[in-house]
Amino acid sequence: MEKWIEVYQGDLGIALTDTFTTDLFFSIFDTRFAKLFDGVRQDSGDPIVFAEKAIEHYKKLRIDPMSKTIVFSDSLNVDKVEEINNYCKGKIRPTYGIGTHLTNDVGVKPLNMVIKLTAIRAGDKWVPTVKISDDKGKHTGDTDAVALCKQILCIG
């Protein structure tokens, strides 16, 4: 997050929480980060559980959750948006990253396609990247790199 802040200087102020699981994210998302970022993005797991965690985290940091935004963007449909909106009303500001299930309504089965970073080039060497999602089946990256990352971060 430090690099993100350095590069974007306050713009693009929504933090993606599940790069290494939401629980790990909130353990390092301290008062400084919480005040610098406009909000957080939920991209895996149960959106209501996520909202509860985010609201409680902001309260613990003595930040009014109503001053913050959650961008919900995981497999949204109209019913799910309505449920999330009803839950968040008066607690935190919800907004939505509309995707496949709301934009592909032409009767064709939608592609379930997500593009993820798999490696970065550091000098003349390629280094694998990983994402440890809140949804166990959505971890991405080299299998050995995922296992090493989970071991280093003590993620079950």
Image: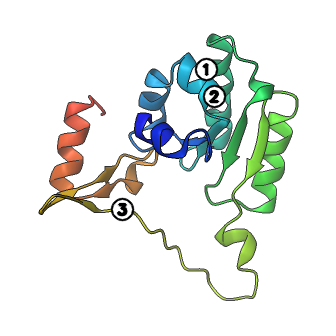
Q: Are marks 3 and 2 in contact (CB under 8 Å)?
A: no
Residue at 61% of width from left, 20% of height from top?
57
Q: Secondary structure at mark 1?
A: helix
Query: In the picture shown, does residue 106 fall above or below 119?
Result: below
Q: Nearer the viewer, residue 107 or 63?
A: 63
Q: Are marks 2 and 1 in contact (CB under 8 Å)?
A: yes
Q: Is residue 39 visible?
A: yes
Q: Nearer the viewer, residue 154 or 11?
A: 11
* Quarter location, residue 62: top right
Quadrant of the drawing holding the N terminus:
top left
Q: CA distance from mark 3 to mark 1?
A: 28 Å
Q: Which mark is residue 57?
A: 1
Query: In the picture shown, does residue 95 fall above or below 154?
Result: below
Q: Which residue is mark 3?
A: 117
Q: Secondary structure at mark 3?
A: loop
Q: CA distance from mark 3 to mark 2?
A: 26 Å
Q: Residue furthest left?
A: 124
Q: Are marks 3 and 1 in contact (CB under 8 Å)?
A: no
